[in-house]
């Protein structure tokens, strides 16, 4: 893993916007998020996959499958693995979550209450 990309609200927002579908002639990757349905461009998702992986790897161990974790989108996804709050905005946590789902790097877990996921 490279530490060049830091888990940051602006990077998550920019990555999400750049991967969203704009053309009507491309079959989208459709992801159900927490608050809306997302439509992503498959080629741009593929181009951003490594960057998305780096962002996801910076989430706390509670999200890392390799560490036996499962994390709550709402209560823990706003913090990085060093205990630094990178965002308090659920909309940005959701963007990172759906980018992970769209690139098959995140698995949603069945849970009562808060949505839970792990980084594969």
Image (cartoon, rainbow, N blue to C red):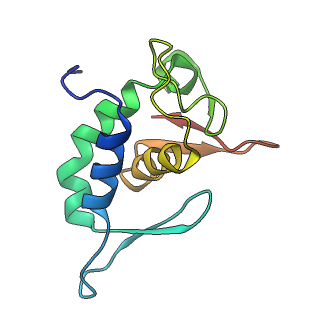
Decide if residue 94 is on the left or right side of residue 3: right
Vertical order, 120 against 58 (above or below): below
Q: Position of residue 23 (x, y in %)?
A: 24, 82
Residue furthest to the bottom in view is 25
Decide if residue 14 is on the left or right side of residue 75: left
Q: Residue at x 43, y 44 (%)?
A: 96
Vertical order, 85 against 23 (above or below): above
Q: Position of residue 17 (x, y in %)?
A: 31, 60
Vertical order, 114 against 20 (above or below): above
Decide if residue 66 is on the left or right side of residue 53: right
Decide if residue 30 is on the left or right side of residue 35: left
Between residue 116 and residue 66, name the one nearer to us: 116
Say which quarter of the image contains residue 70. top right
Q: Residue at x 28, y 51 (%)?
A: 14
Vertical order, 115 against 64 (above or below): below
Placement of the C terminus among the 4 image quadrants: top left
Say which quarter of the image contains residue 18. bottom left
Q: Residue at x 82, y 43 (%)?
A: 112
Say which quarter of the image contains residue 29. bottom left
Q: Position of residue 104 (x, y in %)?
A: 40, 49
Q: Residue at x 28, y 50 (%)?
A: 15
Placement of the N terminus among the 4 image quadrants: top left
Q: How many numbered circles does the render carry?
A: 0
Q: Position of residue 116 (x, y in %)?
A: 65, 39
Between residue 82 and residue 116, name the one nearer to us: 82
Residue furthest to the top in view is 82
């Amino acid at each position: 893993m490279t530490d060049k990309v830091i888990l940051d609200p602006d990077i998550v927002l920019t990555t999400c916007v750049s991967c969203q579908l704009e053309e009507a002639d491309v079959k989208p990757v459709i992801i159900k998020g927490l608050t809306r349905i997302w439509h992503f461009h498959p080629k741009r998702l593929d181009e951003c996959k490594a960057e998305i992986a780096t962002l996801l790897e910076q989430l706390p161990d509670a999200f890392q499958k390799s560490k036996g974790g499962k994390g709550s989108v709402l209560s823990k996804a706003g913090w990085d693995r060093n205990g630094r709050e990178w965002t308090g905005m659920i909309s940005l946590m959701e963007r990172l979550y759906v980018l992970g789902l769209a690139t098959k790097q995140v698995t949603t877990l069945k849970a009562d209450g808060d949505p839970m996921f792990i980084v594969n």
